[in-house]
Image: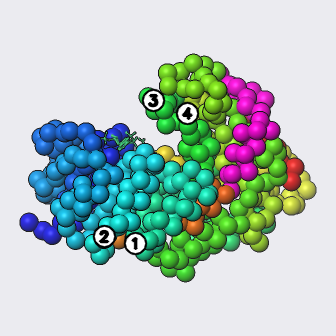
């Protein structure tokens, strides 16, 4: 048997573990990059050994690679209260050297365990992996960062955001920094506006308890879409290592702020009927559609409105980055028609790429139109969670969110959350299956700043 690294999954009986984490690991183990791991699942639920193994087996899929088969052969489940110090010590003893502790738990339980771990020596090389949300605001994220920092060094902390494991998102790096067409024009001189959109047709999918507390802004924009923005807006890293890439992402986010007041730069709405859904507290006024316009206040980006939008129960599953280039200042006289510039669309799910460019149109010679250059990007067989786990297992935090970035993402949205709480920005309504409130016109926020 090869030397296996142990992953201790807290909250192993939960939704995330069986729906995303274990299938992600399975996809990683199916490929050439991974060696087998030893998974110990733990939680308060009592699960028979064969029941747990069956869950892992289901998540790994039909054809087991040798690494997946080895992983399956050594996996086990240990029941117990994760906040009990004696149970934690026993788990660590069982896990052996340099374990990965993966917290797939409600955030308050994770914090309680981190507090309990203060009194326990962790083995050298322990990696800690935290699910989102990391804290509930900037202050609590900073508090949790402080606690976690007493346990292991920052490079052993993995704040998981699986959007960073998506091929289409990672492809931004290659598309931008290895591309002569785009790199020289990726700035305010040439770009008019950017949209980062993740609209879903799906509704609550039985996760009302979680979603009703979070809402679209915290669920999607505060975490996933701001990280996509960081990759889109950052300057080129010197090398592709975690220190350089994460520093550039952090720099971009430190310069990011709302494009105007919360009233000018944000909109919120929820679909008609949401308040009556099972598990929803109507008094909470949770939004199911959120839109935020920000500016990255750097030489490269100042003045470019960047709109982040995400919602549920919408008519179209629009999941894309749209980069709209400015039209040229001057056209030769005698060229007629549209004066639109190029538009680059980068699909987030999965990787479709389309560039519309001005060209002579169908209305006769010397009349401008747009032509579309379409491509489908290769997608990796490794699922986003598998990609992020690959980094964690190797002790490489490149695809993990750094502590200051986790805090910064809260700081960016906090003025909006405050304004929404006080009702300064009205909660609008839209029909499920529509494109949002009719007066939004499905376009970018009208900004005045
Ligand atoms: P669950 O609510 O399903 O909780 C996971 C497990 O935590 C439960 O099965 C339960 O196991 C244990 N648990 C729950 N409450 C307590 C408690 N009070 N004390 C001790 N253990 C408790 O969460 P999910 O699996 O949905 O999510 C886990 C984490 O991942 C959360 O932080 C969530 O925000 C995040 N996340 C989830 C996503 C998803 O799609 N599910 C997507 C992205 C992030 P037991 O009863 O066996 O102890």
The residue nearer to you, when weighing 119 against 344, is 119
Percent of width and height locating residue 403 = 53, 66
Tell me the element at label 1: loop
Query: Which label sits in the foreground, 1 or 4?
Result: 1
The yes-or-no answer for disc 2 within 8 Å of ligand 1 is no
> Magenta residues, as a range?
412-440
The residue that disc 2 covers is 122
Percent of width and height locating residue 388 = 39, 59
Q: Colour scheme in the image?
A: rainbow
The residue that disc 1 covers is 152
Q: Quadrant of ligand 1?
A: top left
Give left or right: position of 257 versus 32: right
Does the CB distance between marks 3 and 4 fall below 8 Å? Answer: no
The residue that disc 4 covers is 212
Percent of width and height locating residue 133 = 51, 50
Mark toward the start of the polypeptide (3 vs 4): 3
Q: Residue at x 13, y 55 (%)?
A: 74
Q: CA distance from mark 1 to mark 2?
A: 8 Å
The residue that disc 3 covers is 205
Q: On the image, which quarter does residue 318 sit in?
A: top right
Query: Which label sits in the foreground, 1 or 3?
Result: 1
Mark toward the start of the polypeptide (1 vs 3): 1
Q: CA distance from mark 1 to mark 4?
A: 33 Å
Q: Residue at x 73, y 31 (%)?
A: 427
The yes-or-no answer for disc 1 within 8 Å of ligand 1 is no
Percent of width and height locating residue 227 = 57, 58
The residue nearer to you, when weighing 133 against 177, is 133
Few, some or many residues within 10 Å of mark 3 (<14, 14–19, 20+): few
Q: CA distance from mark 1 to mark 3?
A: 36 Å
In this view, 449 is above or below 301: above
């Amino acid at each position: 048997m090869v030397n296996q690294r142990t992953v201790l999954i807290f909250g192993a009986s939960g939704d995330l573990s069986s729906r995303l984490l274990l299938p992600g690991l399975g996809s990683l183990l199916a490929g050439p990059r991974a060696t087998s791991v030893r998974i110990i699942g733990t939680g308060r639920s009592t699960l028979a050994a064969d029941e747990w193994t069956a869950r892992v087996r289901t998540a790994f899929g039909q054809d087991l690679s040798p690494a997946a088969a080895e992983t399956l052969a050594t996996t086990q489940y240990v029941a117990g209260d994760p906040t009990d110090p004696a149970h934690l010590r026993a788990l660590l003893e069982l896990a052996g050297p340099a374990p990965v502790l993966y917290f797939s738990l409600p955030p308050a339980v994770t914090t309680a365990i981190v507090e309990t771990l203060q009194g326990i020596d962790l083995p050298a090389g322990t990696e800690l992996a935290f699910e989102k949300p990391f804290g509930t605001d900037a202050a609590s994220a900073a508090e949790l960062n402080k606690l976690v920092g007493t346990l292991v060094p920052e490079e052993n902390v993995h704040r998981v955001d699986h959007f960073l494991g998506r091929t289409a998102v990672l492809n931004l790096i290659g598309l931008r920094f290895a591309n002569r067409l785009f790199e020289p024009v990726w700035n305010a001189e040439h770009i008019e506006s950017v949209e980062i959109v993740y609209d879903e047709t799906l509704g609550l999918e039985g996760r009302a308890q979680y979603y009703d507390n979070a809402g679209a802004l915290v669920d999607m924009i505060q975490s996933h879409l701001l990280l996509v923005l960081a990759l889109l807006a950052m300057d080129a890293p010197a090398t592709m290592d975690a220190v350089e890439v994460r520093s550039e992402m952090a720099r971009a986010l430190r310069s990011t702020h709302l494009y105007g007041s919360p009233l000018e730069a944000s909109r919120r709405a929820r679909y008609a009927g949401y308040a009556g859904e099972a598990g929803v507290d109507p008094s909470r006024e949770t939004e199911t559609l959120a839109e935020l316009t920000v500016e990255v206040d750097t030489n490269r980006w100042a003045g470019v409105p960047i709109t982040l939008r995400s919602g549920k129960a919408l008519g179209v599953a629009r999941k894309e980055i749209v980069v709209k280039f400015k039209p040229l200042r001057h056209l030769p006289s005698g060229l007629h028609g549209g004066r639109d510039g190029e538009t680059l669309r980068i699909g987030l799910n999965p990787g479709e790429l389309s560039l519309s460019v001005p060209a002579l149109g169908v209305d006769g010679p010397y009349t401008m139109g747009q032509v579309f250059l379409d491509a489908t990007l290769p997608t990796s067989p490794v699922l986003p969670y598998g990609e992020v786990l690959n980094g964690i297992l190797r002790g490489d935090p490149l695809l993990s969110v750094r502590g200051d970035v986790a805090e910064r993402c809260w700081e960016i949205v906090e003025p909006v959350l405050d304004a929404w709480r006080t009702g300064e920005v009205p909660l609008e309504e839209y029909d499920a299956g529509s494109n949002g409130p009719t007066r939004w016109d499905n376009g970018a926020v009208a900004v005045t700043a």
